[in-house]
Image (cartoon, helix red, strand yellow):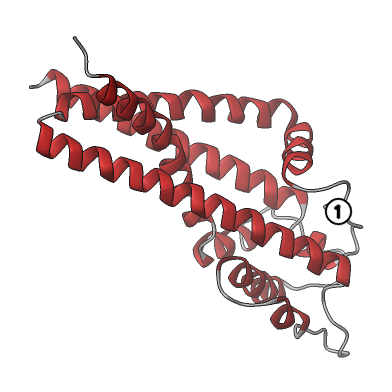
Amino acid sequence: MKNPFENFLGFLITVSVPVVISGLSILILLSPIFMGLEYQRPGFPPDNYGFSTQERLIFGNQTRRYLISNMTLADLEELRFEDGEPIYIERELKHLEDVKIVLKGVSKVFWVAVGLVILGAVFAHYKDWWNGYKRAFSRGGWLTTALLGMILVLSLVSFQALFTNFHLIFFEGNSWIFLYSDTLIRLFPIRFWQDIFLALGITTLSGGVLVGWLLRESRRSE
């Protein structure tokens, strides 16, 4: 008879794996490497209102650091154009604050998932449950593959609908809608977000396939 606790722990590990893999993908995309490659990629749309690629890199990376560090809105308010005007208006600052709150929430869920995966490994070590652990992990990899495959298809079919629904879920009202002349859109145009979603989908999908396949093969070889 199967152990109910092992079944429950296996389920928790399976649903945690997509969170861990996608969380690691997000960390990669929040690195300065991705931003540097994106802004300097051939075909990336120029700013029609005057930002050079170098200015985008400077302001974009400062904004990125705010989202993942202990920087405050006051630090962003100090970012200025050459004429002394702040690069972000109050509405943009409020949205960036909301984005930071969402990322903090995502980070908490990520670390809970990591903790569950580690807990499962500890339990497997002391209770000789490695086959069950690998099985749960492998299923998590295939679950990741299915979920991200669906998101990739949706992004290719109608990225605008996916992008809009994403914001409707995580942000209030139309607080995320800005003018093309606003700094946030000039730094992060729709093409930037299309590439973000595509890169996130590809890296997470690849991670899911790799985990699902490798652990399945390791169980077969035992």
**With 158 as the anchor, is 6 left or right in this view?**
left
- Tell me which amino acid carries mark 1: Ser
Label 1: which residue?
Answer: 175
Crowd tier of the residue under label 1, counting other residues whose Cα lies within 10 Å: few below 14, some 14–19, many 20 or above = some
**Where, by quadrant of the figure, is residue 6 drawn?**
top left
**With 6 as the anchor, is 61 left or right in this view?**
right
Work out whether 186 lies above or below 154. below
**With 123 as the anchor, is 139 left or right in this view?**
right
Instruction: Work out which quarter of the rendered image holds the C terminus and state it.
Output: top left
Q: Nearer the viewer, residue 209 or 106?
A: 106
**Residue at image point 57% right, 75% down:** 70
Q: SS of the residue at dot 1?
A: loop
**Residue at image point 50% right, 63% down:** 31
**Residue at image point 71% right, 25% down:** 157
Q: How many marks?
A: 1
**Residue at image point 50% right, 38% down:** 202
Q: x, y (%) of residue 14?
A: 37, 29
The residue positioned farthest toward the top in the image shown = 1
**With 167 as the anchor, is 72 left or right in this view?**
left
Q: Nearer the viewer, residue 150 or 190?
A: 150
Q: x, y (%) of residue 20?
A: 41, 43
Residue 49 shows up from this direction: no
**Where, by quadrant of the figure, is residue 143 drawn?**
top left
Residue 14 shows up from this direction: yes
Work out whether 185 lies above or below 136. below
**Where, by quadrant of the figure, is residue 48 drawn?**
bottom right
Q: x, y (%) of residue 214?
A: 24, 29
Q: x, y (%) of residue 99?
A: 69, 58
Instruction: Work out which quarter of the rendered image holds the N terminus and state it.
Output: top left
